[in-house]
């Protein structure tokens, strides 16, 4: 089954949105298979956001993402990568429609509450960067037969 990496960013943690965000993915029917509260090192931030290293906002992005705890998660389910992106909403909260996480809880692009992998390749890379194999839990959820 497909897996994706989702992270409540430092602003979301400080604003007490961990529960709200977990609730949305749980209620949707996705399965949580890994999670932890952690502080991102500079090295991890460079790796994670490497694709943006030449952008003017890169320095501020690294500073922000390392500025306090994040809540890192791995969610599993059919088409979870694109569905999680849809649930997050557009990168700029001003363009994110109401009902999405960024549309409901964000105002500015620098503090947009949540990260989610944008492809199978980035999901594999990001899960590997943030979690070791033994932190990913394999189990059966009893509601799955009512979801699929
Ligand atoms: P997303 O997080 O939706 O995948 P992205 O990969 O293009 O968006 O950018 C990563 C993060 O970088 C984004 O969540 C917020 C920040 N960012 C993107 N564009 C920015 C900009 N123009 N100014 C400031 N920060 C920006
Ligand atoms: Mg991205």
Image: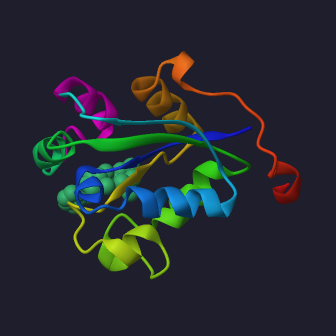
Q: Is residue 4 left or right of residue 77?
A: left
Give me the residue at 32% from left, 38% from top. Answer: 51
Please give left or right for residue 42 compared with residue 86 in the image: left
The answer to which image quadrant residue 130 occupies is: top left
The magenta segment:
42-55
Is 99 or 24 nearer to us in this picture? 24
Q: Left or right: where does residue 96 sit relative to residue 122?
A: left
The secondary structure making up most of the magenta span is helix
Residue 143 x, y percent position in the rendering: 80, 52
User: Quarter holding the C terminus?
Assistant: bottom right
Q: Position of residue 32 (x, y in %)?
A: 60, 43
Image coords of residue 75 (percent x, y): 58, 44
- Is residue 54 covered in magenta? yes
- What residue appears at the point 45 percent right and 80 percent down from the top-left corner? 97
**Where does the image place residue 76, in percent across and percent down from the top left?**
65, 43
**Residue at position x 43%, y 58% in the image:** 19
């Amino acid at each position: 089954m497909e897996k994706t990496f989702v992270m409540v960013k430092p602003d979301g943690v400080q604003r007490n949105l961990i529960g709200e965000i977990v609730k949305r993915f749980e209620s949707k029917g996705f399965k949580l298979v890994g999670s932890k509260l952690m502080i991102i090192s500079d090295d991890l931030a460079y790796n994670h956001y490497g694709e943006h290293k030449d952008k003017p906002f890169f320095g501020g992005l690294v500073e922000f993402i390392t500025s306090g705890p994040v809540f890192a998660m791995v969610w599993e389910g059919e088409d979870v990568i694109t569905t999680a992106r849809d649930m997050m909403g557009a990168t700029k909260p001003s363009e994110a429609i109401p009902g999405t996480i960024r549309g409901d809880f964000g105002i500015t692009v620098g503090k947009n509450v949540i990260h989610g992998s944008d492809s199978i390749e980035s999901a594999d890379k990001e899960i590997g960067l943030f979690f070791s194999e033994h932190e990913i839990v394999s189990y059966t959820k009893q509601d799955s037969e009512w979801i699929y």
